[in-house]
Image (cartoon, rainbow, N blue to C red):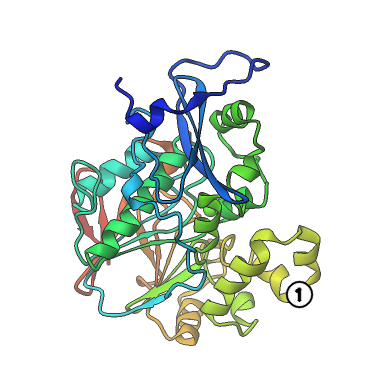
Amino acid sequence: MKLLPAALLCLPLAAASQSPVDSSFTDGPYIFFDSNQVVAKWVSGGTLFTDTLSPGESLQLDPGVSHSFDPSCVDLEDPFVAHPRISFKGVKKLAALSDIHGQYILMLKLLRAHGVIDAEGDWAFGEGHLVVLGDVFDRGDEVVDILWLIHKLEKQAEDANGRVHYLLGNHEVMNLKNDLRYVNKKYRTTTSLTRIPYNVLFGPETYFGRWIRSKPVSVTINDMVFVHGGLSETCLNLGLSLEQMNTAFQKQILDMPEEEILADPALKILYSEVGPIWYRGYFEEGFTKKRARDILRFLGKKHIVIGHTPAPQVRGLYGSKIFAIDSSIQLGEDGELFWYEEGKFFRGSLSGEKIKLQ
Ligand code: CA
């Protein structure tokens, strides 16, 4: 495969000490802010490549390295605003999917089937909004492809007056906090080749790390609240606004030692199983339509859209007050989108069919 000129300048740096890596192995790129310079690393053909980028230079890769990396969407000067707008009104069409867990191909098929992206994988949803409701990380082996796809779509959507919202799930938080129990073994090969610990690949001095650390745990769109696990009464009783919860994750929880989180009563709740990224209470016996109604009244909204707890299909609970949209994409076989259009709610299948949710 023909290399682009910039890639020709890069030196392969495969370390001699490691075991041979499959010659089809590719991963990356990962971009690091290393004091005054920007360094990109990727693996192609089982070999590690490193390139130092001069100011204004964009990273050009052999197209075989990444399915979704688009250098024109990377802005190395972008500080990634840590308090992005989290409330949107007047959105006419929206697609959401959750718990993709490294299943890039399935994500592409779903988005294509519903015209969110085109055949080339570029934004085709105009002023629509796409919500990625957390848990891109872990289990599957196409996590980095998904991250670069979301990143590209984010830029392309903004250019079209649309929007992509990537929310933190518990697996984003686990990965940033170095809880690596569910990391696919592919990324252990990458850490071995790069000799960079996994958490440093997504650390605060990386492009991915800064980008993900700017993401919220919750956004509101029209009369819907989106959050990965759910909002419990215990969590809401903290009296924090959604914006304050987002800030607590971005500024404290993501990079604070666990013992400090647990020593702070409010952070401890946000980080716990009744916090927004782990909560499963809507599925427990004893949860009622009245409780859903009370939570929504407190929030001043009509629907909560959640992922985190898988089922074969997107479904409405408690008279569609809650939409549970983790459709088991993580299994890599099938999956659905949640679809909103002009006040109506649908589940969207892999074949492009839209079935109205009651
Ligand atoms: Ca989850």
SS at mark 1 in the image: helix
Whether residue 156 is visible here, answered yes or no, is: yes
Q: Residue at x 27, y 57 (%)?
A: 156
- In the foreground, 358 or 277: 277
Q: Residue 79's spot in the image, x, y percent?
A: 49, 63
Q: Residue at x 38, y 34 (%)?
A: 66
* Residue assigned mark 1: 265
- Is 143 rendered above or below residue 296? above
Please tell me in which quadrant of the rendered image residue 62 appears: top left
Q: Is 230 on the left or on the right of 347, as rendered?
A: right
Q: Residue at x 50, y 86 (%)?
A: 298
- In the foreground, 73 or 113: 73
Image mark count: 1
Q: Is 239 on the left or on the right of 144, as rendered?
A: right
- In the foreground, 67 or 168: 67
Q: Residue 282's spot in the image, x, y percent?
A: 52, 66
Whether residue 339 is visible here, answered yes or no, is: no
Q: Residue at x 35, y 45 (%)?
A: 71
Q: Is 135 on the left or on the right of 153, as rendered?
A: right
Q: Residue 166's spot in the image, x, y percent?
A: 43, 59
Name the quarter where the C terminus is drawn. bottom left
- In the foreground, 28 or 77: 77
Name the quarter where the N terminus is drawn. top left
Q: Is 192 on the left or on the right of 45, as rendered?
A: right
Q: Residue 239's spot in the image, x, y percent?
A: 61, 85
Residue at the top extreme of this rendering: 20
- Is 188 rendered above or below residue 346? above
The 10 Å Cα crowd at callout 1, few under 14, some 14 to 19, many 20 or more, is: few
- Is 343 rendered above or below residue 140? below
Q: Amino acid at mark 1?
A: Pro
